[in-house]
Image: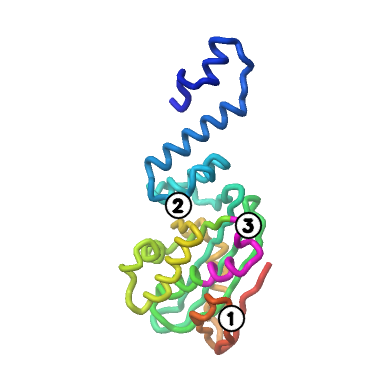
Amino acid sequence: MLVSHNDPGINEVVFKGANFDSLQLCFIIKTRVAWWVKAKFPSSLVSIAEIVADLRVVEIVLSKELSLVVPAVWKPPPVGWLKFNIDGATRGVGLGGGIGGILKNEFGVSLLSFSLRVGAGPPVLPEVLAIFYCIWLFVNSEFFGRCKLVVESDCKMAIDWICEPANAPSCLESWVKKIAEDCVSNRFIFHHVIQAKNMEADSLAKLDCGWGLFESVVIPMVLWSGRARDCKGGFTGKLC
């Protein structure tokens, strides 16, 4: 039971005929749910206040901690949060690829998007670069500091590396460590989703993936400091 007979507010209503306060009851229920979530998943970066403010945050926590199976449709983030769906695509080992992503609010309104070509590398490289670039784009946007961020990717391997950077291959270690550091310092949440819930990002990644003839783009680490440097082929990112 979320509300017991020991709650003073309930006792006042039942035994003393006080007026029923639905807002107080709602707050009590939300608070108890929040404390249960934090007790069950103490390592979660989501705070009690954030859960009380919007119970939809609980779904983010449960989906991440329990790998729950959810319907294959995009779901909006809680109030005060933004969701960045990202993806990477490649033409094959040693060939160029592309990255793409789209940032939306709780109403499903697109706020930012990007579609970039990347240079040759291992097949998982675009997936990591997509995460790296979406975070850089977010922290340099007007939304940083005003909204919290959930990043969704359909690449479970990349998400696992961010959670455990020590498991990342040496060729991607610097990228993964930087992402993990920024995740902790800014309390970003990374969430694995099935591809069917990530189709817009998938389309953006393939838009400039290299099915045609063009020069590749290499994303430098210097991007993270906010000093975007021109690269071979130039950046093709775009804002909504």
Q: Is residue 184 above or below residue 7?
A: below
Residue nearest the viewer, comparing 181 with 108: 181
C-alpha gap between disc 1 and disc 3:
23 Å
Picture coordinates of residue 125, whole percent (x, y): 42, 75
Residue 16: image location, x then y, percent = 57, 10
Identify the residue at image location x=38%, y=45%: 41
Question: Left or right of 159: which side holds 51?
Answer: right
Image coordinates of residue 48 in percent, x first then y, are 49, 43
For the residue pair 175 and 24, the one nearer the viewer reads as: 24
How far apart marks 2 and 3 lie (CA) works out to: 17 Å
Q: Is residue 167 above or below residue 226?
A: above
For the magenta stretch, what is the residue range? Answer: 133-147
The mark that comes first in sequence, 1 or 3, is 3
Query: How many circles with numbers are drawn on the protein?
Result: 3
The amino acid type, in three-letter code, at marker 2 is Leu
**Residue sitting nearer the eye, 181 or 115:** 181
Which residue corresponds to mark 2?
45
What residue does disc 1 label? 228
Q: Residues within 10 Å of mark 1 (few under 14, many from 20)?
A: some
Tell me where residue 234 sits by quadrant: bottom right
First in sequence: mark 2 vs mark 3: 2
What label sits on residue 146 in the rendered view? 3
The residue under the point 49% across, 78% down is 97
